[in-house]
Each structure stands twice: as structure tokens, then as C-alpha cells.
Image: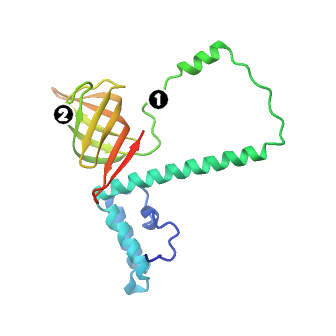
Amino acid sequence: MLQPKNFKNRRNYYRILHVQQDAPIEVIKASYRTIMGELGSHPDMGGTHSEAIVLNEAYQTLCDSRKRVEYDFLLSLRQKKSHKVFASRKNRSNQSGDKSAPKPPPQTKSKDDDQKQHTKPFNLEKRNINRMKQQGNMSFTLPRSVHYHQGELVDLSPQGMQFISKEKIDPASRIKVKCPLLSGSARVTNCREIREGKARTYMICLNFMKVEFNHSSGAFLSVKG
């Protein structure tokens, strides 16, 4: 495989094209033209063949909505794994540096403290990864049902999704979802009513518990939440 010069992070297509991860296609195209033309990365203008290969690969991926969703999914997983590795190394470093330091006296907990700790609400809507707008049809089951209903996909991330439904689904319900990009099971974190005249629909927010992401090559990536 050719190794491009001056590209320290070949896997991050956003860095290669000098754009933010939420950049629209118009910005990506403009940046690509600037890099290939004005900055002389095209082989006909003095650039290397290996640089052009990576630039074209990044451009084709980020300008294709399906490929971009798949790439963002894998990129976020790599970033999440890197953060865990960094945190683990930092903890080991802190532990090794604190061996000579005196340990603080143990703190006693009262029954009230234990009760507060166990009754602290869990924020189901918190998410660490920005969701990407992704429109299209999707299907879902209602709780304790095997029949699928139709919904309209609004946005998507490796942690969850949002869609519009004519059916109201109570928060904390567990349902199954599927669309051309993925299939899996999820937990409802929020259900917000939307009224347009006499019509009534619901914005459903989900957190994935288990998801299989369908790649263009036909392989599946399974992730458990």
C-alpha cells in the first residue's frame, strides 16, 4: 500500500481535507478543490501520486452520504477506544507517582449518603458523540410486539438515533429498529409530541443496546451498548 507523505493521520479524512466533522458537502468540495488545485497537491501541479490517492479517497467517502455515515461510525469508535487507552495510561501514571504520598484517612458514609448515591437519576439522554442528520425510512416494533411500524429517520450516531413516528412510545421502553444502514435493539430515552394542525406525530429518541451496522461491502459490525 502506498504511504502518502505529509499525512500523519491517514485515517482521519476530515483532517486530510481540512474541514470540521459536521462540514456540509459544499464546504468539503470547496476544500478539496483548493487542496488539489491552489495548494498544488494534484500530480499535474507538482503533488505526489500517493497524496492524490488519499485526497480522492477522503473526498469520495465524505461526499457520499451512506459512506460518510459508516465512516463516522467507525471513526467515533476509534476515538472512543483511544480515549479509554489514554485515560488508562494516565491513571497508571498517577498511581505510580502517588506511591510515596500519604494516603488520606478513609471517609465514613452515612445512610443518607448511600441513599442519595443509589437514588441519583441516570441521564438517559446524555450522549458524547454528535449525531449526524440522516433522512430516510426506517422500521420499528412497539414494546411487546413483533410487528414493524414505519418511521422517518432524522439523525444517527453510533450511540443512538432519532426518528418521527405516528405511534407514541413511552420512555424506557425497549424496541427493535432497522433501516438500510443498520438493525438492532434500543431503549427509548425521550418521546416528544409534534403537532402540525390536526396532525400529531412524535419525535422518538433512542439509545442503542445492540446494533449491527451494514457496510457497503456486505459485512456487519456488531456493537453492544
Q: Which residue is mark 2?
A: 149
Residue 195: image location, x then y, percent: 22, 28
Amino acid carrying label 2: it is His
Residue 89: image location, x then y, percent: 65, 50
* Image point (43%, 75%), residue name: 1
Occupied quadrant, residue 139:
top left
Occupied quadrant, residue 210:
top left
Decide: few, some or many residues near mark 2? Use Cα within 10 Å; few <14, some 14-19, many ≥20. some
Way the structure is coloured: rainbow
What SS does tag 2 mark? strand
Tell me: residue 73, above or below residue 103.
below
Q: Is residue 182 left or right of residue 98?
A: left
Q: Is residue 174 left or right of residue 200?
A: right
Could one spot residue 118 in this view of the protein?
yes
Residue 69: image location, x then y, percent: 33, 53
What SS does tag 1 mark? loop
Residue 15: image location, x then y, percent: 47, 64
Q: Is residue 93 left or right of residue 153?
A: right
Please tell me how many numbered marks the rendered image carries. 2
Q: Which residue is mark 1?
A: 123
How many angstroms separate mark 2 from mark 1 (CA)? Answer: 27 Å
Occupied quadrant, residue 207:
top left
Q: Is residue 125 left or right of residue 113?
A: left
Please state, as top left, top right, bottom left or bottom right, where the C terminus lies in the image. top left
Q: Pick whichever, 155 or 113, lies toward us.
A: 113
Tell me: residue 52, above or below residue 44.
above
